[in-house]
Image (cartoon, grey):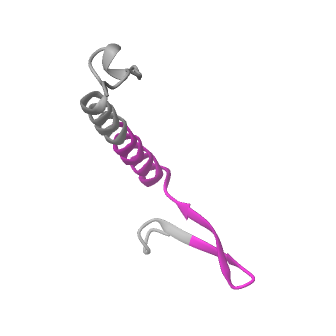
Amino acid sequence: MEKEGGQCVIIEDGQPIYLVKRLDDAEEDIEKVNRDLEDLRTNENQETRLTEPEDVMSREVRIEDLPF
């Protein structure tokens, strides 16, 4: 595994089933995924804040008679 960069693929019936890798590498991957998820949450929160109305009145639907 050291020669191949610390990873090994286990194949069953001609299909890759498992990926075995060093714990240090797996922990780095998990940290990166967690950072990416946090960035996505931050971006979603920023977009939501920009599109939400500022007051309750702007979210109400009103029906008014039109003058004819």
Q: Residue furthest right?
A: 13
Q: Residue at x 35, y 42 (%)?
A: 40
Residue 49, position as x, y percentages in the image: 28, 27
Q: Position of residue 19 (x, y in %)?
A: 58, 65
Chain part drawn in magenta: 9-38
Query: Which sits in the foreground, 62 or 68?
Result: 68
State which quadrant residue 53 falls in: top left
| Quadrant occupied by the C terminus | top left
In the picture, measured across the screen, residue 10 lies left or right of residue 29, that is right
Q: Quadrant of residue 43?
A: top left
Taking depth in this image into account, of 12 and 46 the one nearest to the observer is 46
Residue lying furthest front in this view? 68
Measuring 41% from the left and 69% from the top, which residue is drawn there?
Answer: 5
> 7 or 53, which is in the foreground?
53
Residue 18 falls inside the magenta stretch: yes
* Residue at 47% from the left image edge and 52% from the top image edge: 26
Residue 17 location, quadrant: bottom right
Answer above or below: position of 43 versus 13. Answer: above
Q: Residue 31 magenta-drawn?
A: yes
Q: Nearer the viewer, residue 16 or 49?
A: 49
Q: Looking at this rendering, what residue extends furthest in the bottom direction?
A: 14
27 in relation to 3, above or below:
above
